[in-house]
Amino acid sequence: MNPSIIFIVFAIYTILLFTISWWVGRKADNQSFFIGNKSSPWYIVAYGMIGASLSGVTFISIPGLVSTAKFSYMAIVFGYLVGYFVIANVLLPLYYKLNLTSIYSYLNSRFGMSSYKTGASFFLLSRIIGASFRMFLVINVLQIFIFNAYGIPFIITVIGFVGLILIYTFKAGIKTIVWTDTLQTSFMLLAAFISIYYISKHLQMNIGELYQTIDKEGITQIIFTDWKDPYFIIKQFVSGVFIAIVMTGLDQDMMQKNLSCRNLKDAKKNMYWLSWGLVPVNFLFLSLGGFLFYYAQQQGITIESTSDNLFPTIALQHLGMGAGIVFIIGLIAAAYSSADSALTSLTTSFSIDILGINRKENTSDHQKENTRKIVHIGMAMVLILVIAAYELINDQAIITKLFTIAGYTYGPLLGLYSFGLFTKKQIQDKWVPLIAILTPFIGYLIKISAPYLLNGYQFGFELLIINGLLMYLGLILISKPKNTSE
């Protein structure tokens, strides 16, 4: 496909985003940036969060994952339903009751400053890693199919892409993102539907016949019953529950949008509609993956490198210009959707949790806004460096890396919040950073030892639960009796 056409599509879509950003952010301030002045319609937030939940990972990696994991990912998605129910009925009431801007402020009131800083730091680490993975996935495709043709180095592409996101989120932050995410979600879903249409047309089969075919091939298998299998259904379902809780409920990126809703009732509606909406949407992308895999088999197409190249290779090199343009639009939408909210949440957490701009009573609103803008630029630079570094280690499906790393970095957050919510105990706050750092190391030792000690058992996404449990046990060790005079 002609790189110039792809570049024109990219430019037009970017201009559209900037137009929406300018219109929404005309009268924005710090409260607009952080929580959208608590004026976001819940149904707009819910629809937009579908796109944010999908991101470039679902758009590219989920279809590619079908070649090895089949439809087992649906077990994780069903687990999301339970996880989102917990978020709506346990975490959201807490956040709204305390009127939080950063959700990690809860840890300060419950345990102390060391716990607070630890929780925020682990989020920052998790989100920087996760966001850079998502952006790398998309930027790498754009690099291969557009910018290599013009001799533009990868690092320049990264700087340009992150720079565009920095500019259109710079003024209004979450207030802009709530509305631009609706656009991103629409184009991602449209790209999936139209891509399926093109595959069906090329194979001269209707969608029903296509699905029946891949079902007979065994590609649609959801249930894996071998307990040692990484895709064992119970393991996948339980992992889905906790992935939803930590990667949405304990994640400033996702919760920042919820906190922009007008009230708790609206935020709960958003969470329920989002959870059920993700079921058919993820099934759509898995079906797309099954169709792509079958198409590749029928056409004798060999996918080089990783399975993440399955969708872009077929869309851009085999299905014609129309399919290629649709894919690029969906890809760009996925990229912007995950990157803009990630940059905004990183800026919010660092400004509020680490620098404490809301705790400085003698600082003017103008000074706070200037600090926030400096942090926003700094976080953009950090993402650029991490994405550039990640180019050297692209050796397996991105979604597996993302959740594996999240198992280490989100685990301590899961343990901290569980201990705070479900016990009355106080802890020796100064020891929390040490426990949080030791937890991932112990978790890693358990992971590499499991195949030898547990008859071949291999940990998958449930590593998140193990690390959360380790953190919880560590907090018990440093706990102290509740002061009975309180």
Image: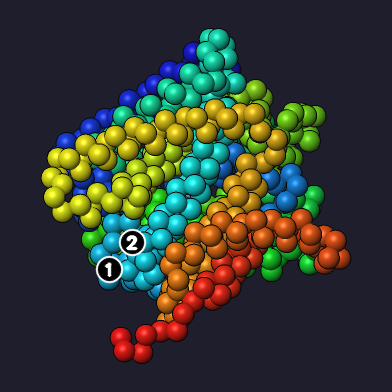
Residue 175 figure quarter: top left
Count residues near mark 2 (Cα–Cα under 10 Å), then give few for <14, some for 14-19, many for 20+: many
Vertical placement of residue 98 versus 33, above or below: below
Mark 1–mark 2 distance (CA, rounded to whole Å): 9 Å
Q: Is residue 357 left or right of residue 417?
A: left
- Label total for image: 2
**Label 1 sits on residue:** 98
Kindly tell me whether residue 178 is visible in this rendering.
Answer: no
Residue behind mark 2: 105
Q: How is the image coloured?
A: rainbow
* Residue 456 versus residue 22 in the image, above or below: below
Q: Is residue 390 left or right of residue 70?
A: left
Residue depicted at x 38% and y 26%: 163
Look at label 1 and name its amino acid.
Leu
Residue 192 in the figure: left or right of residue 404: left
Residue 239, horizontal then vertical, whole percent? 62, 63
Q: Identify the residue at horizontal 48%, vertical 64% (top origin).
A: 432
Query: In this rendering, is residue 418 above or below 283?
Result: below
Where residue 443 appears, as percent x and y from the top left, is: 66, 60
Q: Quadrant of residue 367?
A: top left
Indicate the position of residue 5 as horizontal and vertical percent values.
48, 16
Left or right of 347? Residue 360 is left
The quadrant the N terminus occupies is top right
How many residues crowd mark 1 within 10 Å: few (<14), some (14–19), many (20+)? few
Report the quarter where the C terminus lies. bottom left
Question: Disc 2 residue type?
Answer: Ser
Residue 19 or residue 435, whichever sits in front: 435
Q: Earlier in the sequence, mark 1 or mark 2?
A: 1
Taking the spot 33% from the left edge, 37% from the top edge, the residue there is 376
